[in-house]
Amino acid sequence: MPDIEGTNEAKQYYTEIPQTSKCYFLKGSNSLDWGMKNRLGRIFNPTSGNTVMLAIDHGYFQGPTTGLERIDINILPLVPYADTLMLTRGILRSIIPPDTQKSIVLRVSGGTSILKELSNESLAVDIEDAVRLNVSAMAVQVFIGGEYEKDTIINMTKTVDMGIRYGIPTLAVTAVGKDMVRDAKYFRLATRICAELGAHYIKTYYVSEGFETIAASCPVPIVIAGGKKIPELDALKMAYRSIQEGAAGVDMGRNIFQSDSPIAMIHAVRAVVHDNETPETAFELYKTLKNKKS
Ligand code: 5RP
């Protein structure tokens, strides 16, 4: 039996202190349920408001991409420095140690390869499996203007509906087809459609003109993809500008894992995303860490 003696005397109700109710730190997310907010708070750092997602899901449509041939050897050493891993359930189950403390964003769309029309995707993961894997968000590709535009939008809205049932947020990934113009006008359209239809945050590409209008007109957080490998300083400049112009982080793959020194690069990206360092300072950090290793 619990010891109840003296408990009446010990109680302290602080009647003079009203209970506070804080606004949630992420843009457009204040009305979400507790589980959604808790999961988003495992992806986005509540102090900086931003995230460094490490994207390693490329294999789901293009096989063993350069730098991802051996995820156990090349990627596991990077995991401690990412806020979140974005990947498929196959890689998660086969390679990522289940005692990881990192949040997971699970790729849930798929069904096509580089040999066929890429926009012809379906949902490729059952919500129950996302729950079993304890993921913090589900990522689904949306091809606005693509051949299967409507199907991919419906893939996203279904993911949003299923996720709401279990408190799992949806990341809409705006995909660009080979012949599509990548400009602010297009990405304003794509990101806004995804947000209007319920995505909790959106991944898009950085554009050098007008990115701030994409971020401003999207009512939920935006993260940028890194895109194809470019020199480290240029990738850091892109990440820096995106943050200054309203992005809440990066979901970066090739510009990290294809770098000459992926660990140095992810540290440098973190400096820009979380500590507001300039690209030049972050690049110095990159060089120092790279040289230390060699
Ligand atoms: C693949 C993806 C990738 O996760 C995304 O493109 C990010 O990787 P990278 O920085 O290499 O572009 O969504 O469809």
Image (tube, rainbow, N blue to C red):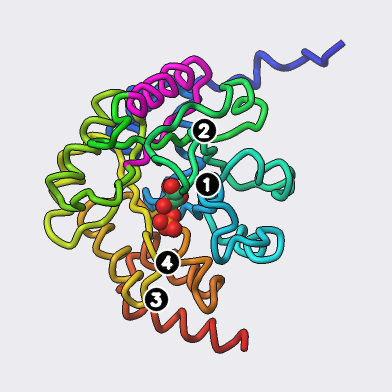
CA gap, disc 1 and disc 4: 16 Å
Report helix, strand or loop for mark 4: helix
Query: Mark number for residue 108?
Result: 2
Does the Cβ of the disc 2 residue fall within 8 Å of ligand 1?
Answer: no
Earlier in the chain: of badge 2 and badge 4, it is 2
* 234 left or right, relative to 107: left
The residue shown at (38%, 51%) is 50
Residue under label 1: 86
Range drawn in magenta: 151-174
Query: Which amino acid lies under the numbered mark 1 shown in the image of this protein?
Result: Met
Query: Which amino acid lies under the numbered mark 2 shown in the image of this protein?
Result: Val
Is 92 inside the magenta-drawn segment?
Answer: no
Q: For the C terminus, which image quadrant?
A: bottom right
How many residues crowd mark 1 within 10 Å: few (<14), some (14–19), many (20+)?
many
Is 172 inside the magenta-drawn segment?
Answer: yes
* 245 left or right, relative to 100: left
